[in-house]
């Protein structure tokens, strides 16, 4: 009686988790130590998946523990890795647990690049394996009963969790086995079986009959609800339905039996008989309809004995009226089971392999924070550099400090010599030429990487479009045009960056060509430089003048401001603050991260002092430049002016401007080189991302093509051909054979191998044509006997009527089937030999005298079956 339903495990295709996870780790975590640690964890996770899904699992707690550990790891990595078709792309392929496949192809399966799909299928296997472990328990002891009840309730909770989350986790139609209807029914079945286990324990512990009756009645209710949910749906194996129906009747019969004992104790003898009669009817139904699945002989005997004794006592002693079934009070219900909720971690031995890796939400918040920080730092540095360039331009236009240093009129001012020396130490004009020469090569390399990445996307998308056009609605996967939108947007962004970089390179080259000659002059030795500068009479009258001293003081102050800016810029670049802990704390406390509010507050706290110093430096420079311009006006009025001095001053101005342009050009070109090199790394990562998703799409495409080819092969190539009329029409004068009662399916549980159908009863032979010499039902060797003579005047059977014997064996005769034996067709009976399809038999070569009874032909040697009888023509 204790047949329990267990669920078949889903089968998964092999997947290498380590490779894509390690790629993401190497791209996202710069530290070599952190990369190595996380990659080791990824390899351990891949081994855990192989152990949980890559081998047959024993029906034991240790196997379930392995599955639970893998499920817990999936839950832990879900917020830490961006699993999707265009990021960390891992395609998980699972077969339908209940689809047995066909002769021409495998069972139905679904492949998705979705971690939620993997979690759902693994949790299904956890529930399925728990049901198998529970079904293996020994229910004759308390330990087995407790273990079975625990696992059934866990399985019920697992299936219920899938029902609640599968549609949101997959965002598409799932396979039948994990659809909400199927797993909802499985959850209720597991709950009913757990309730039955509690009924068995209560019976074994000899609890009060009223309590046992309520437990049994609740179990019957659960089984009835489960049967109602699945009886009109073709989702579960057919073997499940009769078991549910039988269990519903059995639990209800047990409830009535134990309630009858309570009625007897209350001296309600009529009620006792009524309940026992109802229980007897229920088990009789089970015995007649579902005996192939559940043996209820012991329960039938127990109820019948109790019913006979109750009737005897009532007939001779009590004479109590037996009430109708509808007048009996309903039996109460007592549920001692509930679905175990899925609360991670499910495994008691769980330890997070990626404990030191921050969740993806925190990573994204840190990334946005770093962008905010970079914008703030770059803005401050840009303000300071712009101010420095402005100061240099103003000084160059005023020929300062060369104007106040030019006391001899025929030597190079010291400030110009210092600038020339600095330029020569940096490589001079050759450095600028080399940097400008390298830029096109770096640019071309980046363009080739980007173009190759987009070319790969274009080719895969064209292939996908061709297959979609060919197979139309059969091609059920995300279109490449939609899937690649983020990648194409990213590629377009890189194109814009390269275009802007090309424009910036052009401006740098143009400015370099404008100032190249002056820069080259400034790089020459002192003697050549002095010869190139026109000489002039010195302004000796201004030596020691107060105006000159003021200018020198102001210029020294301005130089000090510039040096402070350089130090301030270095300080801004060197400030580093890890926001990970801040965001982790916010996520733990609030369950979400308000990145903008946290980042703005922290940036103001960390960089507030620096930004204030930047503004003070800008304001101080503004005042110094104003004072320098005013002092220079006084200096110019006092200075003796002539054409030679003006020409000399103009050359010195150009040299000062050339130095400033050289410094700025070298800085811009080095930044450009650094930019192109860093962009190369970014574009290589982008190319790897494109290659990975294209490889995953190719794998998915090959799997889908294989499935489509198999499904096309399974489709019928031609309509079914109807049978000839003589094979479907009964013989004249014979009654149509009564349709036998439906034969129940073989006794197999979920996932077991199907057996051949049972042999149907022999066909009914018409009275006019039946005789002892006719063939017995297939597989029975009857002794031949002579046919009686026909009654005079009786009409012979029509030539167009079918023979009364079955045309061939009515049961399967393939090798391996019980009762199989070869049946060679007798030579006297082969209606297909001469094309006489209208004749039920071939004419006998032996002629008889009309009116004489036929005689059997001689037995053919080696033929173990009786010959076909001869019929009067």
Image: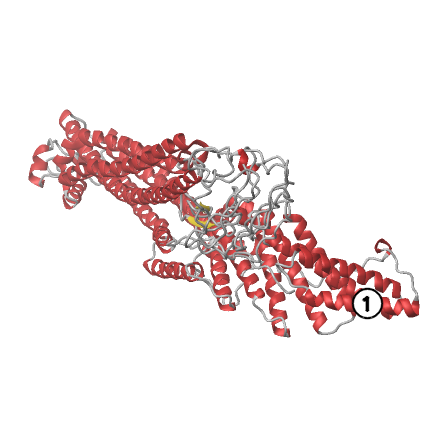
Q: Quadrant of the N terminus?
A: bottom right
Q: Residue at x 59, y 38 (%)?
A: 731
The image quadrant that residue 816 belongs to is: bottom left
Using the image as rendered, state which of residue 25 and residue 795 is in the foreground. 795
Is residue 845 found left or right of 164 in the rendered image?
left
Q: Position of residue 313 (x, y in %)?
A: 88, 70
The quadrant holding residue 549 is top left
Q: Is residue 545 visible?
A: no
From where the camera sits, is residue 56 visible? yes
Left or right: 591 as drawn, with respect to 379 = right
Q: Quadrant of residue 783?
A: bottom right
Label 1, residues with CA under 10 Å away: few <14, some 14-19, many ≥20: some
Q: Which element carries disc 1, helix, strand or loop? A: helix
Q: Position of residue 312 (x, y in %)?
A: 86, 68
Note whether 390 is above or below 870 in the view shown: above
Query: In the current view of this chain or complex, which residue is farthest to the top?
Result: 643
Instruction: Judge from the rendering whether residue 124 lies leftward or rightward of residue 491; answer left or right.
Output: right
Residue 696 is situated, as x and y percent measured from the top left of the image, at 36, 45
Q: Which residue is the site of mark 1? A: 308
Residue 236 is situated, as x and y percent measured from the top left of the image, at 57, 50
Residue at (66% x, 52% y) in the render: 226
Please give the count of numbered marks on the rendered protein.
Answer: 1
Horizontal side of 730 relative to 115 (left or right) equals: right
Quarter of the picture holding the C terminus:
top right
Between 34 and 118, which is closer to the camera in this rendering?
Answer: 118
Considering depth in this image, is 649 or 605 the residue closer to the camera? 605
Q: Which of 80 and 643 lies nearest the eye of the viewer?
A: 80
Q: Using the image, determine if residue 452 lies above or below residue 87.
A: above
Q: How is the image coloured?
A: secondary structure
């Amino acid at each position: 009686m204790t047949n329990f339903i267990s669920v078949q495990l889903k089968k998964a295709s092999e997947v290498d988790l380590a490779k894509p996870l390690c790629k993401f780790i190497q791209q996202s975590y710069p530290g070599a130590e952190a990369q190595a640690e996380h990659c080791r964890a990824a390899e351990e996770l891949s081994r855990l998946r192989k152990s949980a899904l890559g081998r047959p699992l024993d029906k034991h707690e240790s196997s379930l523990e392995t599955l639970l550990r893998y499920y817990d790891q999936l839950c832990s990595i879900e917020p830490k890795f961006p699993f999707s078709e265009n990021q960390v792309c891992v395609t998980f392929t699972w077969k339908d647990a209940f689809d047995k496949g066909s002769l021409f192809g495998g069972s139905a399966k679904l492949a998705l690049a979705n971690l939620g799909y993997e979690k759902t299928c693994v949790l299904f296997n956890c529930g399925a394996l728990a049901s198998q472990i529970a079904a293996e328990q020994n229910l004759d002891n308390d330990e087995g009963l407790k273990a079975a009840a625990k696992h059934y309730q866990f399985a019920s909770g697992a299936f219920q969790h899938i029902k609640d989350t599968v549609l949101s986790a997959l965002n598409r139609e799932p396979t039948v086995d994990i659809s909400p209807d199927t797993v909802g029914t499985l959850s209720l079945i597991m709950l009913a079986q757990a309730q039955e286990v509690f009924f068995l324990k209560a019976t074994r512990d000899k609890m009060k009959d009223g309590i046992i009756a309520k437990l049994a009645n609740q179990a019957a209710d659960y089984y009835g609800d489960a049967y109602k949910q699945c009886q009109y749906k073709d989702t579960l194996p057919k073997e499940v339905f009769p078991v549910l129906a039988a269990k519903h009747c059995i639990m209800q019969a047990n409830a009535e039996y134990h309630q009858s004992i309570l009625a007897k104790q209350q001296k309600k003898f009529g009620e006792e008989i009524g309940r026992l009669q109802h229980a007897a009817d229920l088990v009789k139904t089970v015995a007649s309809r579902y005996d192939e699945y559940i043996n209820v002989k012991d329960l039938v005997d127990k109820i019948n004995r109790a019913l006979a004794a109750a009737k005897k006592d009532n007939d001779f002693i009590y004479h109590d009226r037996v009430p109708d079934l509808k007048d009996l009070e309903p039996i109460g219900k007592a549920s001692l089971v509930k679905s175990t909720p899925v609360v991670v971690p499910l495994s008691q031995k769980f330890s997070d392999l990626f404990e030191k890796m921050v969740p993806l939400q925190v990573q994204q918040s840190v990334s946005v924070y770093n962008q905010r920080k970079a914008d703030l730092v770059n803005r401050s540095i840009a303000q300071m550099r712009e101010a420095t360039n402005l100061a240099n331009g103003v000084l160059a236009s005023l020929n300062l400090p060369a104007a106040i240093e030019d006391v001899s009129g025929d030597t190079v001012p010291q400030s110009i010599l210092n600038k020339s020396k600095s330029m020569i130490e940096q490589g001079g004009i050759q450095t600028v030429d080399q940097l400008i020469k390298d830029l096109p090569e770096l640019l071309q390399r980046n363009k080739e990487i980007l173009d190759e990445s987009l070319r790969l996307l274009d080719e895969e998308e064209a292939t996908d479009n061709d297959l979609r056009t060919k197979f139309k609605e059969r091609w059920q996967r995300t279109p490449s045009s939609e899937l690649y939108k983020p990648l194409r947007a990213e590629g377009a962004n890189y194109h814009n960056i390269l275009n802007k970089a090309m424009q910036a390179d052009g401006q740098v080259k143009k400015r370099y060509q404008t100032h190249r000659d002056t820069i080259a002059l400034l790089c020459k030795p002192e003697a050549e430089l002095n010869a190139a500068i026109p000489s002039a009479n010195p302004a000796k009258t201004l030596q020691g003048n107060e105006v000159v001293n003021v200018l020198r003081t102001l210029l020294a102050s301005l130089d000090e401001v510039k040096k402070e800016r350089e130090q301030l810029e270095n300080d801004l670049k060197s400030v580093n603050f890890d926001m990970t802990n801040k965001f982790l704390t916010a996520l733990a406390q609030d369950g979400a991260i308000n990145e903008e509010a946290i980042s703005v507050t922290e940036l103001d706290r960390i960089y507030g002092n620096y930004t204030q110093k930047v503004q003070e430096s800008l304001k101080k420079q503004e005042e110094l430049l104003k004072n320098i311009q005013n002092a220079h006006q006084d200096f110019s009025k006092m200075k003796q002016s002539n054409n030679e001095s003006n020409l000399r001053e103009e050359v010195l101005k150009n040299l000062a401007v050339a130095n400033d342009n050289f410094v700025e050009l070298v800085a811009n070109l080095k930044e450009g080189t650094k930019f192109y090199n860093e962009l190369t790394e970014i574009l290589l990562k982008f190319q790897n991302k494109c290659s990975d998703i294209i490889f995953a799409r190719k794998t998915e495409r090959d799997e889908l093509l294989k499935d489509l080819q198999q499904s096309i092969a399974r489709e019928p190539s031609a309509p079914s051909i109807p049978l000839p009329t003589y094979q479907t029409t009964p013989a004249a004068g014979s009654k149509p054979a009564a349709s036998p009662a439906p034969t129940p399916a073989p006794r197999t549980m979920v996932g077991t191998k199907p057996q051949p159908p049972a042999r149907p009863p022999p066909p009914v032979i018409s009275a006019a044509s039946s005789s002892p010499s006719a063939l017995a039902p297939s597989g029975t060797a009857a002794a031949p006997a002579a046919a009686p003579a026909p009654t005079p005047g009786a009409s012979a059977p029509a030539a167009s009527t079918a023979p009364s014997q079955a045309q061939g064996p009515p049961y399967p005769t393939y090798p391996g089937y019980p009762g199989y034996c070869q049946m060679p067709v007798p030579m006297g009976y082969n209606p297909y030999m001469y094309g006489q399809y209208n004749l039920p038999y071939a004419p006998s070569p032996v002629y008889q005298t009309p009116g004489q009874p036929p005689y059997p032909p001689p037995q053919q040697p080696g033929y173990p079956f009786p010959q076909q009888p001869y019929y009067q023509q």
